[in-house]
Image: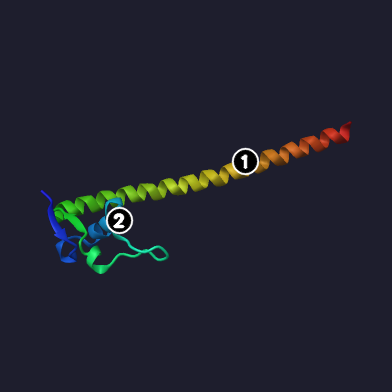
Amino acid sequence: MFERAVMNLKMGSTYFIYFVLRSKYFIDFVESQMKGMAYPAISDSNFQKGIIPVPPIEEQKVIVAKVKQLMSWCDELEKKIEKRDAYQEKMIQAVVKQAFKTEKETVETE
C-alpha cells in the first residue's frame, strides 16, 4: 500500500521523485495552485501541500526502471520518425525534380 507523504527526498529514489514531479498528476496539482496572470506562480506553502504517493523503495526502483525503458523506446521512435521524415522530404524533392525534368523534355520535343 502506498504511504502518503509530503515531498521528502530521503523517502525515496531521486529518479522516482523526479518522474513524479514531471507527471501529469503533479503538474495538474501545481497548475491548480498557481496564482497571477502575467507571471503565474505557486507559493512555497501551496507547493508543499502537494502529496506524493510514495511506494516502498523496491517498488520505486521497478517503476523507475520501467519509465526509463519506456522513455528509451520513445527516444528510439522519435529518431525513426525524424529519419522517415527526412527520407520523405528527399523523395518529394526527387519526384518534383523528375516531374519538372520530364515536363521540360516534353516541351522541348514539341
Mark 2: amino acid: Ser
Disc 1 to disc 2, C-alpha distance: 47 Å
**Tag count in the figure?**
2
Residue 17, horizontal then vertical, whole percent: 23, 59
The residue shown at (32%, 47%) is 70
Report which residue position mark 2 lands on: 32
Residue at the (32%, 61%) spot, across then down: 34
Residue 52 sits in quarter = bottom left
In the image, residue 12 sits, relative to residue 96, either above or below, namely below
Horizontal relation, residue 15 to residue 82: left or right: left
Q: Residue at x 20, y 61 (%)?
A: 49
Foreground residue among 97 and 51:
51
Residue type, numbered disc 1: Met
Q: Secondary structure at mark 1?
A: helix
Name the N-terminal-most of marks 1 and 2: 2
Name the outermost residue toward the bottom. Answer: 44
Where disc 2 sits, the SS reads helix
Viewer-closest of 86 and 24 = 24
Q: Could you say where residue 5 lies in the image, as x and y percent from the top left? A: 14, 59
Q: Which mark is residue 91?
A: 1
